[in-house]
Amino acid sequence: MKFSKTYVNILNVAKKKFRSHGYSAVGIGEILAESGVSRSSLYHFFPGGKEELAQAVLHNIHQESISRLESFFFQGRDPVQEICSYFLAKEDEIDRGDNRVSVNMLIMETAEVSPRLHKLACEITDSLNAYFYREIEQCGFSEELTCQVASTVLSMSLGAMNYCSITGRSSLLRNLVQQLPLLFSANGYRPPVSRETA
């Protein structure tokens, strides 16, 4: 679907503001001032105001997150290396100071706004978590162990990314990346032997 420049401008400004300060701390006036559009234009594209704008931002972030996950996952390499590479890229993003509010924090915050946003937050979370489950499934674990390892990785990464976003320091995420191979190894995973090392 093709959107107008005004729609994209409003969406991008809102996303930038929400990722910098959080949903609650940003008012419509700030979005209008930075985007340079009139209040009537904003409500033309987002009749539901800030809540509808948050919904559009979450959909946009969801699509970006899927593209990013797909660029790291299911590439035919060692699944543990793919997961670690994904988190290392997140570490670089934090070190650059790109976003003070992690995607997870924004999803959690907006989930409290209304039942509609809560439902969307749950759908997005389930969708993104499924990528980790399918990646970890490639390790050859049983279904039960895949669920256990996936929930452990997701819990640890959620805490680490939120902490790193808040503090602006990526050290906790770096520690997680160093520990992940040990978690998989402790559960019986052995990485495939590459042709170079065989």
Image (cartoon, rainbow, N blue to C red):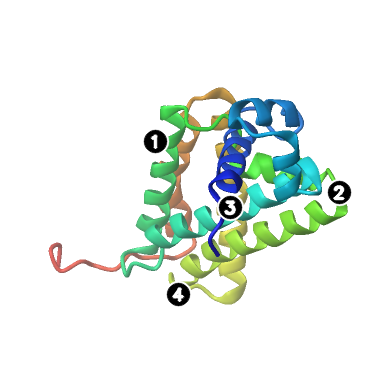
Mark 1 or 4, nearer chain start? 1
Mark 2 or 4, nearer chain start? 2
Q: Position of residue 114 (x, y in %)?
A: 86, 48
Query: Circle 1 is placed at which residue position?
Result: 92
Residue 149 seen from this side: yes
Callout 1: helix, strand or loop? helix
Residue 156 placement, left or right of 56: left
Circle 2 packing at 10 Å, graded few (<14), some (14-19), many (20+), is: few
Circle 4 packing at 10 Å, graded few (<14), some (14-19), many (20+), is: few
Residue 28 placement, left or right of 116: left
Q: Position of residue 176 (x, y in %)?
A: 47, 41
Give the residue type that dot 2 points to: Ser
Dot 4 and dot 3 residues touching (CB under 8 Å) = no
Callout 2: helix, strand or loop? loop
Mark 4 or 3, nearer chain start? 3
Give the residue type that dot 1 points to: Asp
Find the distance from the CA under tag 1 to the CA under tag 4.
30 Å
Residue 179 placement, left or right of 76: right
Q: Nearer the viewer, residue 171 or 45?
A: 45
Query: Circle 4 is placed at which residue position?
Result: 140
The vertical placement of 48 against 109, above or below, is: below
Give the residue type that dot 3 points to: Asn
Query: Circle 3 is placed at which residue position?
Result: 60
Query: Circle 2 is placed at which residue position?
Result: 114
Indicate which label's residue lies in the foreground, 4 or 3. Answer: 3
Q: Quadrant of the N terminus?
A: bottom right
Residue at screen point 69% across, 34% down: 38
Residue at screen point 60% across, 30% down: 36
Mark 3 or 1, nearer chain start? 3
